[in-house]
Each structure stands twice: as structure tokens, then as C-alpha cells.
């Protein structure tokens, strides 16, 4: 069964913590032991797992990507958002997380983030939780 | 059942759109709802999902990686292709895509690319489509 | 069935080849054909597949990441290890590898590495091998 998490981003660049929404999707699935697959059907955003305890970590990730892949540059793509496509490619758009005892098996400091690189926009994450 | 997609790359660096070949593998599998796993058994290439509508996006991705990881540099690996190994590590060599109604569940602008960083070469992508 | 691979890293930055440990987990699982999922429950380390024949490749990967994401910089995160979080996000913390005939289906030059970016520490990799 597919589920969809809808997120409305606000800024051009921001990491949105969606851990609670993913945990809720796992709960709704009823799966006790298996895998939670996440897929982002967008080309200017990404999914990443990292620390969500100190929010400054997410900002450091976003700002470092901005330094490596500057927004303003002589890119070939003429829509003005080439940097967002490149950052999306570097971080990736899918994740697989283990499920045990009906819960996401994340490390103590880990959260799941939608990384917006060309917002604000309406984004969605598709979730499939399977037994196994 | 494993399937193999064979690709002959032409240039040292190029992103080859393999979306049609992956879609064909899903069709051949007969799976209606499940997961399509892709694995690239190479260390100087990568797999990535990004925009395939405007081909300049793929070129921007390749050129940005070239700026970050220059081909000519004082690397330790003496075979001359260290940059290709590093780019491969940054983008990764596996993908998981959802399958619904017998088709890849990709976003409107998404395509699947083999990223060649040390071509031209004969490359292969291994595909496993599973129900679930 | 979940399995855990325990690794004790020694240096602040190092890539530890865990291919043999992952292969052993596949063997213990008894799965002949399926998927081996690896998940790293840490936010300052990563998992990557690349060449393990010449150890200098792993060093080039680590040193290139150090050039792109310097350890000393005016980061917001005040624990001193922001660079490790950023590198972890770039490489990712999960892998999916095919299993055939009871063995990992890796390419000839591929090995699996735990990438330590804030060591030495006790790290663990969680492994789930499923039929399919």
C-alpha cells in the first residue's frame, strides 16, 4: 500500500524534519518487522537522514551545499534552478529504513529530512512499508 | 529474476538516460506492484535520478562534479581515474524505484541516468523487480 | 532477522573495509537469492561501495571530502564535528546489495566501506537479508 506525505516548503532552501510523518505512515501500515521505503518524485529536492536534535546541523548541511554548488553561476539549464538539480543528485531521492516492533529503527540522533533546494513549493514523499 | 541492461558509453564523462531500458525490464518482470532495485557493479560510474526533459540539466550535473573533483590532481591512486572513483562514491551505485500498475512510479520530470565518469566503456546495470 | 556488525574505528577519518563482515552476515542468513540491506544508525559516518583492491582509492575519497568540507570552518553546530555530519549526508547511510547463490553480487572491484568521519568510535551497521 502506498502512502503519501505532503509537505509545503516555505523557503528556497530548507531542511524539513519529516520523521514524525514517516513514523505515522509506518504505524498506519501495521507492519511490525520489515522495510520502510521512501521516494521523492521531485528533481530539485532530496531526502536525507541526519541529526535532528540540534537544528543547526541541518542549516550547516544546506549552507555547505550552497558553497559547493552556488545558486548563481553560468549553468546551461536556463530555468535558474540548476543548482537545485545538482544538489538533489548529490543527496539522492530515496531512502530505505528498517522497521522493527512496528517502529522506524533510527539511531538515537537520526531524523528524516526533506531537503528543499528550490522552494517554497508543494512537495510529496511516497512511502511504501513492506513486511520482511 | 535478475535482468541486465548493457550500455556502451562513448565519452569520458556523460550521463546516459536509461529510463526506457529500466521501464522495459519492469514490463518483462510482469510485476504489477512492488519495487525495482537497480545496482551498478562498477566503481567509476554511478546511478542517479534527475530531470531528463532538458538535457542541459545532466550536463550541469556532470560539469559541477568536474569542478568539485578535478580530473587532474595529485591523487594517490596511480591509475589516473581517481576522480571517477570519488564522483561514483558521491552519487552512489544503487537505486530503488516504486512500481505501480506495472510501471515505474517516477515523477513527471524524472529519468534514470547511468553516470559515466571514466568512459567510454561497456557498462551494465543489474535489475531486480520484486512484488510487494 | 536483523544482524549487527560492530566496528571500532581508530582515526578521525578512515574508510574501513567491511565486505567480509557483510558477506558473513549473508551466509549466516541462509538466503540464496534476495537483497542485503545495510543501515548505519549514525550521523557522522556513512556507507559506500567503491574499489577495495587499491587502498589508495579509499584515501583519495576521504581526502577529497576533506577538501570540499573542511573540518575547521565557521559552522553553526557547536560540537566541532559539523563537517562529519555534512559528509555523512553526502554519502548516505544505507545500501542495498543483491544476493545470488548465497553471495553478495558485487562487481569485481567493489567492496563495502564504513566511512568514519568523526572517530575513533564504536560503530555498528545493521543488516537485514531478505528473500526475493
Image: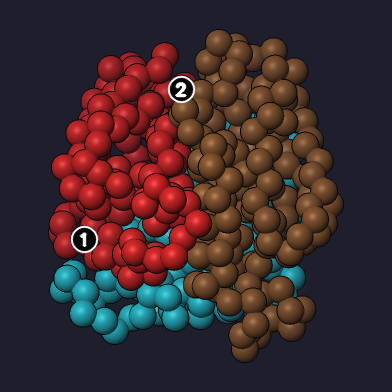
Chain colours: A red, B brown, C cyan
Classify 10 Å Cα crowding around label 1: few (below 14), some (14-19), many (20 and above): some
Question: Which corner quadrant of the image does residue A127 belong to?
Answer: top left
Is residue C52 something that shows in the picture? yes
At 66% across and 41% down in the image, what residue appears? B17
Tell me: B129 left or right of B95. Answer: right
Q: Please name the residue that numbered disc 1 is placed on.
A: A59
* Residue A127 - label: none
Question: Which corner quadrant of the image does residue A71 belong to?
Answer: bottom left
Residue B17 versus residue C49 in the image, above or below: above
At 54% across and 42% down in the image, what residue appears? B54
Q: Position of residue B79 (x, y in %)?
A: 77, 78
Tell me: B108 left or right of C43. Answer: right
Circle 1 SS class: helix
In the foreground, B6 or C39? B6
Q: Position of residue B47 (x, y in %)?
A: 61, 47
Is residue C120 something that shows in the picture? no
**Marks 1 and 2, the one that precedes in the sequence:** 1
In the foreground, A128 or A33? A128
The quarter of the rendered structure image containing the N terminus of chain B is top right
Circle 2 SS class: strand
Q: Position of residue B89 (x, y in %)?
A: 57, 61
For the residues marked 1 and 2, what is the alpha-carbon distance in whole angstroms? Answer: 32 Å
In the foreground, C29 or A32? A32
Single out the residue that lies furthest toward the front: A78
At 65% across and 51% down in the image, what residue appears? B15
At 68% across and 38% down in the image, what residue appears? B18
Residue C45 versus residue B74 in the image, above or below: above
* Residue A130 - label: 2
The subunit carrying tag 1 is A
Amino acid at each position: 500500500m502506498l502512502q503519501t506525505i505532503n509537505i509545503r516548503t516555505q523557503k528556497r532552501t530548507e531542511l524539513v524534519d519529516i520523521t514524525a510523518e514517516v513514523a505515522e505512515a509506518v504505524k498506519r501500515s501495521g507492519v511490525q518487522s520489515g522495510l520502510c521505503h521512501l521516494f521523492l518524485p521531485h528533481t530539485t529536492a532530496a531526502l536525507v537522514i541526519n541529526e535532528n536534535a540540534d537544528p543547526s546541523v541541518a542549516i550547516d548541511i544546506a549552507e555547505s551545499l550552497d558553497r559547493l554548488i552556488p545558486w548563481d553561476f553560468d549553468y546551461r539549464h536556463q530555468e535558474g534552478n540548476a543548482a537545485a538539480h545538482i544538489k538533489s543528485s548529490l543527496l539522492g531521492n530515496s531512502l530505505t529504513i528498517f522497521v522493527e516492533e512496528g517502529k522506524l529503527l533510527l539511531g538515537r540522533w537520526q531524523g528524516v529530512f526533506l531537503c528543499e533546494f528550490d522552494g517554497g513549493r508543494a512537495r510529496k514523499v511516497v512511502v511504501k512499508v513492506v513486511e520482511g
